[in-house]
Amino acid sequence: MLVAKILGINLNLKKTNVHDPVEQEALRKLNPQATIPTLVDNGHVVWESYAIVTYLVEKYAKDDTLYPKDPKVRSVVNQRLFFDIGTLYKNLIAVIMLVMKKEQPSDEQMEKLKKAIDLLEGFLTERSYAAADHLTVADICLLGTVTGLNWLKHDLEPYPHIRAWVSRVTAEIPEYADFKKELDEATKAYIASRK
């Protein structure tokens, strides 16, 4: 959704309850994994967030700033995307799922999450953005994960580079404050419905 905002694309959003068998079956007809998000663009179906992000940029961006074509720069963008989904997000979601089940994460799980956050802090000491000297899709995707730390009330005070980066990135996303407010309200409603 953030990439679409940056690109000026108006999405026709359809909320789907993946726990509802009827809605899940309808989604499965488009996407055999029945996961969200799923994008349908003039009959072309794409799922998995990062696949959607890169598709939107490659198809609709006016230039390659968000997903640079230079192989060396793109390799760093891709590395950060893979780091996010395979390390940072993976460890964050494992902890969030336990918290939602009212279970206590183990010290080992919290240490894995801390190490992943430490890695991101290290990346951001090398440059002002996650993968290049400007905003890329890596920043936008990582931002989603980092803001997920708020759900855990995770203290980012020891991470000055991450905090500065969040401010820098959110300032470049049109109407980010409104988006974040809507997301926070939806998250609270979802959590309340699961209790």
Image (spheres, rainbow, N blue to C red):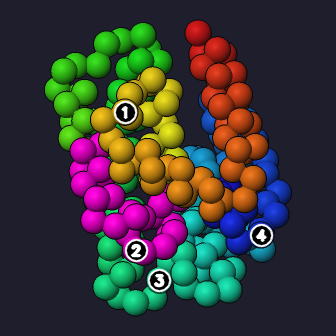
| Type of the residue with mark 3 | Pro
Labels 2 and 3 touching (C-beta < 8 A): yes
The reply to whether discs 4 and 2 touch (Cβ–Cβ < 8 Å) is no
Question: In terms of sequence position, does the residue under pointer 1 or pointer 3 come before the other?
Answer: 3
SS for dot 3 = loop
Which label belongs to residue 157?
1
Q: Could you tell me the amino acid type at mark 1? A: Glu
Q: Earlier in the sequence, mark 4 or mark 3?
A: 4
Classify residue 98 by image quadrant: top left
Which one is in front, 59 or 33?
Answer: 59
- Going by the numbered disc 4, the residue's amino acid type is Gly
Closer to the chain start, of discs 4 and 2, is 4
Q: Is residue 168 magenta?
A: no
Distance between the alpha carbons at the discs numbered 4 and 2: 22 Å
Q: Where residue 129 sits in the image (x, y, percent)? A: 42, 64
The residue tagged 4 is: 8
Place of residue 93 in the rendered image (x, y in percent of width and height, measured from the top left): 40, 35
* Residue pointed to by mark 2: 132
Q: How much space separates mark 2 and mark 3, taking CA atoms?
A: 9 Å
Identity of the amino acid at label 2?
A: Ala
Picture disc at residue 68: 3
Secondary structure beneath label 2? loop
Residue in the picture at 60% in, 76% down: 57
**Residue farthest left in this picture:** 108
12 sits left or right of 4 in the view: right
**Nearer to the camera, 172 or 113:** 172
Q: Residues within 10 Å of mark 3 (few under 14, many from 20)?
A: some
